[in-house]
Every structure is written in structure tokens, then in C-alpha cells.
Amino acid sequence: MTVVVVLEGAVPGRFTVAVSPLAELAACLHVLTEHEHHADRAPWAEEVIRTAPPAFVTGLRRFSPLWTALRWRGFYTGLGSDGGHQGPGHPSSGRGGPGRDGPGHPSPGRDGPGHPSPGRDGPGHPSPGRGSAGRDSAGHPSAGRDGPGRDSAGRAPTLARLPLDQFAQLTAYSCASGYRGYAFDRLLHDPAQAAALRHAASGLPAPHLALAEDLLRGPGALRADVLGFLDLCRHVFFGALWAETEPVLTGAAHRVRQRLADDGPAAALMSLSPSSAQLAHAPGDMAGTAAGPLRVVFDKVHHAVITPARTPVLLIPTLYGAPHLVVKNEPGLPPVMHFPVHSPVVGVTLARSRMLALTDPRRVRLCRLIARQSMTTADLAHRLAMTRPQVSRHLRTLRDLGLVRTERHGRYVHYGLDLTAVGRIGQDVATALQY
């Protein structure tokens, strides 16, 4: 499965790079809930949970469907005050110029009057979580020092102004842990949609069904509870963490903006995930026509096609979200790519190839020899009772996968097993599978 970004007509102005505390909080909550998947963050997560008040621990479990398998869209900017749809009189021309989308789809980072953009709302709508002008030190949109849940004036952010029907729809998707085959646009009014939600959530871990029942019983009360929990997070751990994390994310956002401006969207998107992204043309049709438009293809476990020329894309860096690359592409809302500041070096394709390379019995025997000492092709051929070309093919495979190092001594080339790379295979596989 892949996430495809079609580059035809995708000028840099169709991408907005923003720093978001709410998105980073979602990443942190994911680590706190599933820290066994994030070994490098496990000590931090265990300490936060150990010292947190009971109300926080209870909320962490109750609301966990919002940040586990299917990240809740409410954590991401691009939701206008009317739920992401512009009404009559808004100045969207529908021509798809920089920072704009067609009618009914507000652009991330530059909406019309009354439609708050990420980190910079219109008059009377302060930026969530930031008491100043809502911009970082470079003058780009930023979402704030006061953290999620409330702005510096104590007013509820965009999430609190989201229409209840859309809040219910987006929350239902997380409770069902998927979009395909579900329609929750009339969840609060259609018993059939409510029954479908209960059926989907009943097959998932217990918090999913409990949260679905809370949503159906009282969506307004649930939204208030979620906002209260987000505010509690700020007091328990996120206020201090955000003060340390924001400068790192601001620097990462600046680098991506610079790459967009200097090298264009293809290079900028490839830089988000060098190990799992590929630049390729769409295949031609059955009649043998020329290849289609250029695309950036990300190796993911779900399929989505994003066309920035039609719908502007919001790019958000994350520190605690690594190694995950989260792509949100709900209908009617701007696509979001929540990318790790430090992306994995080894992608799933390379990790799989390394494992497969070590399933060949002859290659394993070869590796056992060069793990002890470096050897020449001739020495290996003699010891393995193989021809030199056969040994060379095996060595070339291992070298191309980064598992063999070479040392030249005069006329001879010695091959040794890179034990550090081999030792990382298990961790690389675990990381790649999560990405």
C-alpha cells in the first residue's frame, strides 16, 4: 500500500509548513500509551505516568483511541470554525492559487474571514496556545507556547468551535479505527450509523467501544471532557516539554520551507522520508501511452492519493512522533503529513531485503566465515566449495544491502561482515513496520 503525492501542478505555494503543539501532544500521548513500541522514549513515558495524578492516567486510557491506530483529525489544524467548509461570501476563487483551494475546502494556513488558519487566526480568534502574535521567530505560523487546550486568554481553541456533528463524525472514525466503508456524517441523527459504529468498535480493544458509547450518549459532554484532558496534559507534562520541543520543530519547519523554495516540492517531500519515499512517474495506460505525471510515493500500510494542485497540503514536523509518518486525508479537509524530524535510516523495503538475504543457507555460511575475520573471494570460494563468481554474487548482494564492509590491501580486497548493521536488523524491522 502507498500514499501517493501527485506533483503535476504542485508549486511550492500549495504547501504550508506549520508547527503545532496539539499535533505534538498527540504524538506524546501515543508514546505514553504504547511506549513498548518506542524503546528510546520508554523511560520518559514511564516517569510521566508514575508521577501523574490518577485523573491523567484514567484519561490516558479512556481517550486512547484518539491517538493509537487511527490518529484523531481533531489534533490537526486545517479545520475551519464552520467545520472546514466555506460559506457564501468567502473569497475562495476555486482556482487553486497558492494558499487556496477550491470552493468548500479552506486552505491550511490561509483561510478566509472567520476561518482560523493553523497558528494564525483571524481577528477575534487568537491562535491556540500562544499568547503572542501566533508566529515563530522567523515570522512563520506557529501554534503556541501555552500548549494545547486553551490559549493565553483562557479561550477554547478551534476544536471547541467545531460543529458538534463534525466532532462526532471525526471521533467516530477513530473509535472505528478506519474510514473505508463507514459513513458517520449523520451519526447523531441516524440509528443505522450509530449501530455501525457500535459494531465496528466492539471488535477493537475495550476503550474504543466505551468511547463510542460516550460519544453517542453525549457528544457535547465528551468534547468538554476531551478539552479538559488536553488542558490537564499541559499541567502534567506538556507545558515544560513544549518549551523544549518548539525550537527543534521550528528549525525543522524552516528547513523544509527552505527546501520547498530552493529545490521544489519533489525534493522537499523526499526529504521527509528518504528511506521509504520514491520518485516515480505514474504508469502509462494499456494502450502503451507515455508515463503519467511525476509522483512521490511513500511506502505505507494504507492507500491515499494527494493532489496538491487541487487541495493544499499541510506539513507538520514532530519530534516525539518518530518513527511514524502520519498522513491524514479525510474527504473535505486539507491533507496533513505529520513527519518525523529524524526519519528512520532504514525503510521497510531495505529491512525486508536484509532479512531475506540471510535466509539463504549458503549466504549464511559465508556470513559466519566473514563475521570472524575478513577474507578474500578466493579464500571464501575454497572454504565454501563454490566458484568465485558465485561468491562474488553473494558478496555483492550483501554489500548492496549495507551488511558487508570491504578493505583493500594491495592487490587484494578483503570482505568482512558489518556486525553493527546486522545487530540493528531487529530494531530496524520494528521501526520500519511502525513507519
Image: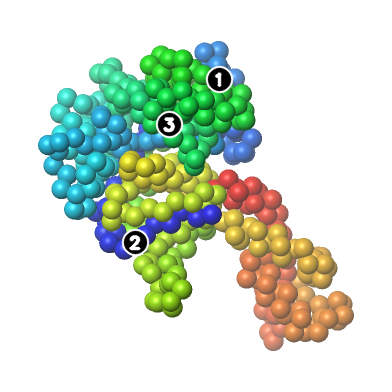
The residue pinned by badge 2 equals 7
Occupied quadrant, residue 37: top right
The answer to whether the residue labelled 3 contacts the one labelled 2, judged by CB atoms less than 8 Å apart, is no
Determine the secondary structure under disc 1. Answer: helix
Residue kind at label 3, given as amino acid type? Phe
- Along the viewing direction, whichever of 335 and 40 lies nearer the viewer: 335
Marks 1 and 3, Cα distance to the nearest angstrom? Answer: 17 Å
Which residue is found at the position 19% from the left and 49% from the top? 94
Residue 235 lies, in percent from the top left, at: 43, 18
Instruction: Give neighbour class at mark 1: few <14, some 14-19, many 20+ (Cα, 10 Å).
Output: some
Residue kind at label 1, given as amino acid type? Ala
Residue kind at label 2, given as amino acid type? Leu
Marks 3 and 2, Cα distance to the nearest angstrom? Answer: 31 Å
Occupied quadrant, residue 397: bottom right
Q: Nearer the viewer, mark 1 or mark 3?
A: 3
Q: Which mark is residue 210?
A: 1
Q: Nearer the viewer, mark 3 or mark 2?
A: 3
Q: From what the image shows, is residue 394 above or below residue 235?
A: below
Which of the marked residues, 1 or 3, is nearer the chain's N terminus? 3
| 151 lies left or right of 88 | right
Residue 20 lies, in percent from the top left, at: 35, 36
Which of the marked residues, 3 or 2, is nearer the chain's N terminus? 2
Which residue is found at the position 43% from the left and 72% from the top? 284
The residue pinned by badge 3 equals 184
- Along the viewing direction, whichever of 37 and 254 lies nearer the viewer: 37
Labels in figure, total = 3
Residue 290 lies, in percent from the top left, at: 39, 76
